[in-house]
Each structure stands twice: as structure tokens, then as C-alpha cells.
Image (spheres, rainbow, N blue to C red):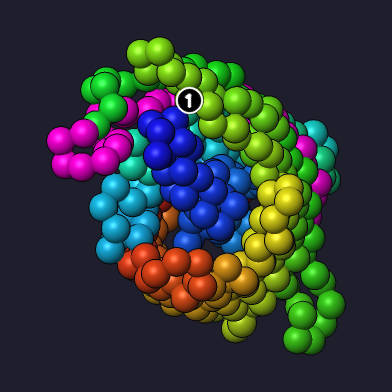
Amino acid sequence: MTKSALLTALIFVTYFAGAQQLPLFTQYRDNLGVINPAAPSSDFLIYNLTTAAGASYRKQWTGIDNAPETQVLRYEHIDAYSGNAFSPMYGASAIRDVTGPLGMTGIYGKFGAAFSDDAEEGGFSAAFSGGLVSYHLDTDKIKVRDADDFLAAGRRTQLYPDIGMGVFCWKKISVPGFFDDDMLSGGLSVPQLMGLNLRFRNDDQTFSVRRIQHYYGQFSWLHSIEDREKFIQTSLWLKYVPNTPVNVDLNLRYQLIQALWIGLGASSGGNFHAETGFNFDSGMDGLLRLGYGFDYSFSRIGPFAGSTHEFSVSYSFGGR
């Protein structure tokens, strides 16, 4: 096998397995503003807190060396109580996603607006994200034939601009009975609007990797219990990449408003999800949240890849 053919095969296996090139999340509701720039934070939709900052770390397929690893930092705000029907939304995020020799590090800002007379009751929002992404390839990590045969050592780096867009809407149900005070929400997004071809040069060879658009849909039903002291949240994450089947990720979370939450879920790609976490009242009109997510793969593509672990922390504040 030639060096270029081997590299192409490696990148295909690591970045195209499951037709997913962008970072995955088990606790995706807590990274909703990263998936869809138009989405308010989940802490606004549940607790009416307008500002949120958080971080997450995900280690995927722990049974495989150089498996995918993702870190995210995020900040987001919605000016929901300005008294205007037009409410600015803005935020920033930093993402690092590495799979073996290939990785990306991006810094993004986002800006949009929500349109609503009372954002607690419902609204519609649209937003764009934009940033600069550094893609890198560590050629010294690519083995060609035996333990002593590697490509020429070094890191090849390419910088590209990146933009995304999304729309989102939410509505509180005010129907007496079972659905009273429930919240329905959903959105559509394209987090990587610009497709691109990455070209890395190594000595006299050129290696190319094509990155294509991902199309996402997010939907949620938040059911209130005992005057909003408890919640059951059903959520759906739809992911589509051209020329591949639609991936459906369905999750159910039970949450005590000032204590813990637990959740279970599964995806059509053969993954089982479990999650748990705690809410801590900071005593300063803020909420500290700690979460843990676990994935187990039942995929029929290749051998068992190992479990996935995800840790998250966030702090939210502000409101009426």
C-alpha cells in the first residue's frame, strides 16, 4: 500500500466512521448552543437563566489507541428581559477535536436575535456563527509498514474560516391538565456551512481530506411535574450527512430542579447512552451543574470500539 493510499484509508476510518466529521456529544442538550447557534442555552429554557458558561471533555472509544477526544468551552447570553420584542443573542466557543493524527482547533463567535414579546413563554430565533479553524495532521503518528517505518515526522497545519447558521423556536404550553406548563422546542442548523478540501503536503506528496456539510435537527418536549419542581425531558437529535442514512438519537431525562438528573437514550447508529448529574444552588442567583455521560457501542461496523466517557460543568445566572 502506498503512503498516500494508507493515509486516505486511515482518515476514512477515523473521520468517516458513522459518517460523522464534527464532534459528537452524549449530553448534547447542554451543548445545544454549539450544535445550533440560534438555540438559547438549556438553562434558559428550563430555569429562565439568561447567561451560561460551561466546559466539557469527551473521550470516545476508550478501547482504541488515539481514539477521538473532544474539549469544548462555551459562553452564551440572551437579552431576554430588555422589554423589546427584538432580543440580541451572542456567545463564543472554543472546540478542540482530535482523532489520531488528524485534529482541529476552532474559535467561534455567534450573534443572532430572538423575536418574542415574552421569551419565557416562547419565541423564534435565528443566528450565525463564525470563526477560524486550524486543521492539523501529525504525519509522525502514521505507521506505514512496520514499527520502524513512518512518514516523515512533522505537523502539517491549515487555517480556514468557518461559518454556521441555525433557526430555533420554543413555546410554553398553557393548557390546563397534563400538558400545563410544558415546553416544546426545536430547531434546524448547519454548523459547518462551508465545505472544504484540506490539503496537506509531505515531501513530494499531497494528501487531501474533504469535509462536507452536516445538517442537524433538534427537538425537545419538557414535561413539568409538581409545579416545575421536577421535569421529564424527551429530546431528539437528527443528524444527516449527504449520501448516508439519517442518524436518530433519542433520549429521556428525569430531573429534580434543585438536585440530580438521570437519563437514558439510544441512537440508530447502535449507541446506548446513560447520563447523570447534579444541580447546586450557588446562593448568588446562579446554578452550578455537573454532569457525566456514558456511551456503549453496539455498532455492527467493525469490532467493539470501547466505551465513551463525557464530563461537563456549567454555571448559569441572570434572569428576571
Foreground residue among 159 and 121: 159
Foreground residue among 15 and 172: 15
Q: Is residue 149 above or below residue 29?
A: above
Residue 141 counted in the magenta span: yes
* Residue farthest toward the bottom in the current orientation of the protein: 177
Quick check: 124 left or right of 76? Answer: right
In percent of the image, x 39 and y 26: which residue is there? Answer: 136
Q: How many marks?
A: 1
Residue 294 counted in the magenta span: no
Residue 140 appears anywhere in the view: yes
Q: Is residue 3 above or below residue 279?
A: above
Residue 80 percent across, percent down from the top left: 68, 42
According to the picture, the residue beneath numbered tag 1 turns out to be 207
Residue 2 percent across, percent down from the top left: 40, 33
In percent of the image, x 16 and y 41: which residue is there? Answer: 147
Foreground residue among 239 and 320: 239
Residue 288 percent across, percent down from the top left: 37, 55
Could you tell me which quadrant the N terminus lies in?
Answer: top left
Q: Is residue 206 above or below residue 233?
A: above
Specify the quadrant of the image occupied by residue 295: bottom left
Question: What amino acid type should be assigned to the residue bearing mark 1?
Answer: Phe
In percent of the image, x 50 and y 67: which residue is there? Answer: 301
Quick check: 242 left or right of 145? Answer: right
Residue 188 percent across, percent down from the top left: 75, 49
Q: What residue range appears in magenta?
A: 121-149
